[in-house]
Amino acid sequence: QRKILAQGEGGYMGVADTCIVIGDETPHEDQGLMISQGKLRTPLLRFDLEQLDLPSHVVIKGARLGLYATSQWNPGRTVTSLVYPLIGDWDVTQATWQDRSASEQWSEPGAQGPGDDYREPAVSSQELTAAGKWYYYNLTELVKEWVQNPGDNDGILLRGEDGPGGFT
């Protein structure tokens, strides 16, 4: 049986997302997910799989994240985007460049601490080339891990590594 996890679709309300922006101590929940080169803007996403109440015998055959690029800065310029699993809880209403929540900071600003803020290696990647199209990331193995160990699901971050572009 195929499940689509989109906020509000079929009563599902388990999506948390925000964006952390270099030097900005304002939470960006509800302002769109922005990604740019040089790790300057980093989207954070979490999907609560426990809300699905999956039976123990469920088999995950595939899982992918689809993100639609609504706009692009510097048209014609690309960004290589990488998906990393986050380590540790963060608060969607309080996460900023410095803080994962009101009471705890990232180990390195911008959630850039490998092994502390996020787990390496990247689990998926996409070359973002233009606005007005969908980009899909294969998260099958990561979702299988989360179903087996729900406490490990701290969500993901998307990091813009290479390219002089930026996307929302």
Image (tube, grey):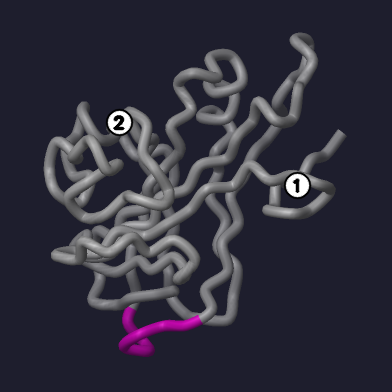
Instruction: Pick whichever, 26 or 168, lies toward us.
Output: 26
Q: Residue at x 37, y 64 (%)?
A: 28
Residue occupying the point 76% across, 23% down: 53
Up-down: is 44 above or below 134? above
Q: Is residue 53 left or right of residue 14?
A: right
> Which x, y percent locates residue 147?
61, 20
Amino acid on which the number 1 mark rests in the picture: Ile
Q: Is residue 101 above or below residue 21?
A: above
Tag 1's secondary structure?
A: loop
Q: Is residue 44 above or below residue 3?
A: below
Q: Earlier in the sequence, mark 1 or mark 2?
A: 1
Within-10-Å neighbours for mark 2: few <14, some 14–19, many 20+:
some
Observer-nearest of 81 and 54:
54
Total label count?
Answer: 2
Q: CA distance from mark 1 to mark 2?
A: 25 Å
Say which of 107 and 125 sits in front.
Answer: 107
Q: Residue furthest bottom?
A: 75
Classify residue 146 by image quadrant.
Answer: top right
Q: Amino acid at mark 2?
A: Arg
Magenta residues, as a range? Answer: 71-77
For disc 1, the marked residue is: 4
Give left or right: position of 168 versus 146. Answer: left
Which residue is labeled 2 in the image? 119
Left or right of 96 on screen, residue 62: right
Residue drawn at x 24%, y 67% is 37
Q: Position of residue 27 (x, y in %)?
A: 33, 60
Main secondary structure along the magenta-highlighted residues = loop
Q: Is residue 154 left or right of residue 16?
A: left
